[in-house]
Amino acid sequence: MKILYLHQHFQKEKGATRSYEFSKFFLKQGDSVTLITGTGTSETTAEGLEVVSTATKYDQKMSKWRRIQAFVQFMTGSFKLGMKQKHVDVIYATSTPLTVGLVGLALSKMKRVPFVFEVRDVWPDVPVKLGYLKNRFLIGILSYLEKQLYKHAAEVVALSPAMKENIVAKGVVSEKVHVVENLANNESMKQIVAKTPTALKVKSWVRDRFVVIHPGTMGEVNGLQHLLNAACELKDKSHIGFVLIGEGSEKAALQHQVVEQGLENVLILDEMPKKEVQSFMKCCDLGAMTVKDARILWDNSANKFFDFLAAGLPVILNYQGWQHDVLVKSGAGEGFLYADQAGYCRFIEEMAQDKVLYQKAQQASKRLSEAYDAERLAGRMHDILVKGAGGYEASR
């Protein structure tokens, strides 16, 4: 089977590597995979993955209109590159943005092959609920396009049970929508040695501290202000520290707050390769998942949640929803409403003080990671692609 994979923000070493992990699995099944992206340069990886890049510049720090321009540039460029691909059996388009799905649909019609649409964020719901998108006419157009993608996709993949509920509520047949969460790379994590960054300051700062870690984007929706507020509440607890790793539009403001409030229990580090982050993660004690105070963000399926589980870290959330439910049921962590700062801080203190309680949470986290094992979910995704391609052929 030849798979044409569309992912504008494809990464191999930083951030979200889901598409890379899936592609490697597909190749091991004997499939041919060509992935069209906007990042990096065109190459053929050691595993045999053909990566074709439109070299579209994109950064979270760009203005809204500059990002829209990047989406359009990738849409036109990826369509042209996609049309050059021969003998494609199935098109696998992963959003965001929604425009990637439109390319998948257009190529599907032109090449008369099925496409599978993966929903990483439910658009336009997320920008509408967050107040970023207010134009009713534009909202109407995006909502129409969203429903057309669901209608014409052979199969739809959601990254969380809550996302599936959202999609089904819009009239999509439940059997057509599959849940394939993000991945816990358990085998890869086993090979990673626990190691702090080489900087002497980091090594001495981490020593003898119970460390809460948050790796990833430092944007407005990530709600890292909440984590610094917790650090401020716990600043007199010198044995507890908070590490933030990454880049984003809010990073400078967060750094300013650390200096202004004298938060010596907070360390903000620059973005680093994923394996280095995971290596450092293994030296830490508690994984933090934070989002802005908005109900729509509870449905997310961020990579770091599953990285924490693979590393055997208990997890703390500043929100509720499906991740809260699985953490509480398994004993691998806890979630709190955004406003419950006291409960949030109390849980961190309990984890830092009670070794027996902490070890139980560690063990539960590692057990929970098996439910999201990378090989297992890649196999599930492969079955969906085979089903999508076969279903299309049967209907022709």
Image: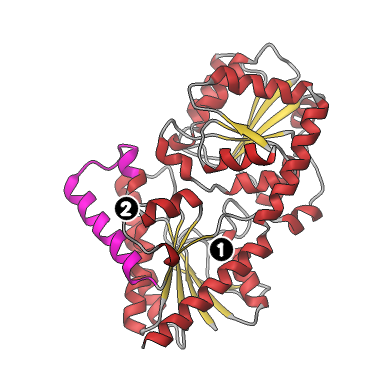
Q: x, y percentage for residue 318?
A: 54, 30
Furthest residue toward left: 137
Residue 296 in percent (x, y) is at: 40, 40
SS class of the residue under badge 1?
Answer: helix
Q: Which residue is mark 1?
A: 19
The residue segment tinted magenta is 127-153
Instruction: Say which amino acid is labelled 2.
Output: Ile
Residue in the picture at 53% in, 66% down = 41
Query: Does the segment drawn in magenta span residue 141?
Result: yes
Is residue 181 or residue 9 the one in the foreground? Answer: 181
Residue 233 lies in magenta, yes or no? Answer: no
Say which residue appears at 56% left-offset and 42% top-offset. 323
Quarter of the image with the N terminus in it: bottom right
Which quadrant: the C terminus? bottom left
Mark found first going from the N terminus, 2 or 1: 1
Residue 258 % position (x, y): 57, 20
Q: Is residue 258 visible?
A: no
Foreground pick, 69 / 240: 240
Whole-angstrom CA distance, mark 2 to mark 1, is 23 Å
Return the residue found at the far top.
236
Q: Is residue 166 visible?
A: yes
Q: Is residue 346 above or below residue 374?
A: above
Instruction: Provide the residue designation for mark 2.
Output: 68
Kind of element beneath mark 2 = helix
For discs 2 and 1, the disc positioned in front in the rendered view: 1
Kind of residue sitting beneath label 1? Ser
Name the image quarter holding residue 129: top left
* Residue plotted at (66% across, 50% down): 274
What numbered label is drawn on residue 116?
Answer: none
